Image: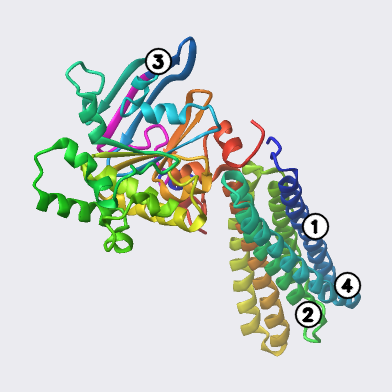
Amino acid sequence: MSTATQTIDNPADPTAGLPTSIRVSDVSLYYGAAQALKSIHMEVPQKKVTAFIGPSGCGKSTLLRCFNRMNDLIDNVRITGLIELEGQDIHAPEVNVAQLRRRVGMVFQRPNPFPKSIFENVAYGMRIQGGIPRSELEDRVEWSLKMAALWEEVKDRLKETALGLSGGQQQRLVIARAVAVQPSVLLLDEPASALDPISTLKIEELIHQLKDNYTIAIVTHNMQQAARVSDFTAFLYLGELIEFGATQQIFTNPKKKRTEDYITGRYG
Amino acid sequence: MNKHISEQFDEELQSARTLMMEMGGLLEQQLKNAHEALLSQNAEKALSVIEVEKQVNALEKELDDQCIQIIARRQPAASDLRMMIAVLRATTDLERIGDEAKRIAKLSLQSGSHPFPDDRFADIDSLMDRVQVMVARSLDAFARSDVDNALATIELDAEVDRQYRTVMERLLRDMREKPEALELWMNMTWVTRALERIGDHAKNISEYVVYLASGEDVRHTRTNNT
């Protein structure tokens, strides 16, 4: 038994030895009096895919939204604890929230392209940043669309409206828009749940390719998707981080009974 | 273990498990009959073992099919996945135990197997007993996901292997000393070899029990590599 144990990752610290992108220390979040996150501790490793799973209302999307301070937009939200992006406290007074969100891009469940051309959708963030010459803008749009595996499908119709694209294409366009400003982290909140199976597989393939360059955090209801795309999986339940481990371990041999019940579809 | 939200899934898993236990029970009976066939020269028992082997093969295919259906339709995870993998693997080992039982039954029918000399009789009898205990314990351990019992059963295989080597050395000596009974010695060699293989299969099943219950793969580990 002893020799076999050595091959199992250290469950106490699954990301040991990996550089950290986001460090979460004792984070709690309250909507008014209701506590939605309860003293979360975890480290999201750099250039890996970390999946957040758990039943509806477990706090997984809330936690994801903490990483780029999207919860600031909601009234009555109070956050305690520390969230660091590459060592920097994201709630520090000197942090510019717009810049934080450029470093930590986000893609939502429903693709939300702007009612503009495909080109302008991708160029949007760079135009806001300003100071980028037209030729470089064009290069960056092409690069971003290639990163999002969409270039071949749209290169001849960049001036057409983005609203004419299929749902799956729109979602890849939104990902191109997010990577255009060269973030270090991409937050994906149910990015494929509104898509058909083929588009879903394309998004999953894209996630696999993007992790060479970006830290990816994905919230998904689809456990098989978490199993397919992620390196690490965090299971949340009623606002608590129940288990965090290598995906390979979580899906074959979870240590906590609640995790086991959830991923095997049992009554908890 | 809590029930699945899908009752149908619970029933499918239960059905596969029950079928595997039935197959195990059938094989325990096969070994018992092969034992009697060989040591009491009971041809009726031998023929029954050969006939029942067809049922064993059919059960293997049915179990495979059930497991494949569950994997394809349910995409089992965690303990459910380990259960499917363990059942699939154990089924293969059980089927091979069946092959060995049939081999022993067939050998018992051969004219060369005239009554064994007393001391060789005792050798085979005791090895037969040991491997039957191993098979029974590995199946008990499987039924109860009992890691301790599985590990203890794995330990027993070392003794079976030691005894196997001793019997083989004696048979070699017999061959040299009484070459006129070569057919008998050869048959006994085959039987001894079959028994040693049955011990290995029971050990394999016990290793799957450890995987099933704890997620640990103890195959080919140092303490266990005999």
Residue range of the region highlighted in magenta in the rendering: A7-26
User: Which quadrant holds residue A143?
Assistant: bottom left
Mark 2 or 3: the one toward you? 3
Q: Which residue is label 3 attached to?
A: A75
Q: Which residue is label 4 attached to?
A: B45
Using the numbered discs, state the Cα–Cα distance from disc 3 to disc 4 in whole angstroms.
82 Å
Please check whether the numbered discs 4 and 1 fall on a single chain.
Answer: yes
Instruction: Name the residue rendered at 68%, 62% in the picture.
Output: B91
**Magenta stretch: includes residue A115:** no
Is the residue A215 above or below the residue B87 in the image? Answer: above
Please check whether the numbered discs 2 and 3 fall on a single chain.
Answer: no
Q: Which residue is label 2 attached to?
A: B106
Secondary structure, mark 1, is helix
Using the numbered discs, state the Cα–Cα distance from disc 2 to disc 4 in whole angstroms.
10 Å
The chain ID associated with circle 3 is: A
Mark 4 or 1: the one toward you? 1
Q: Which mark is residue B22?
A: 1
Secondary structure, mark 4, is helix
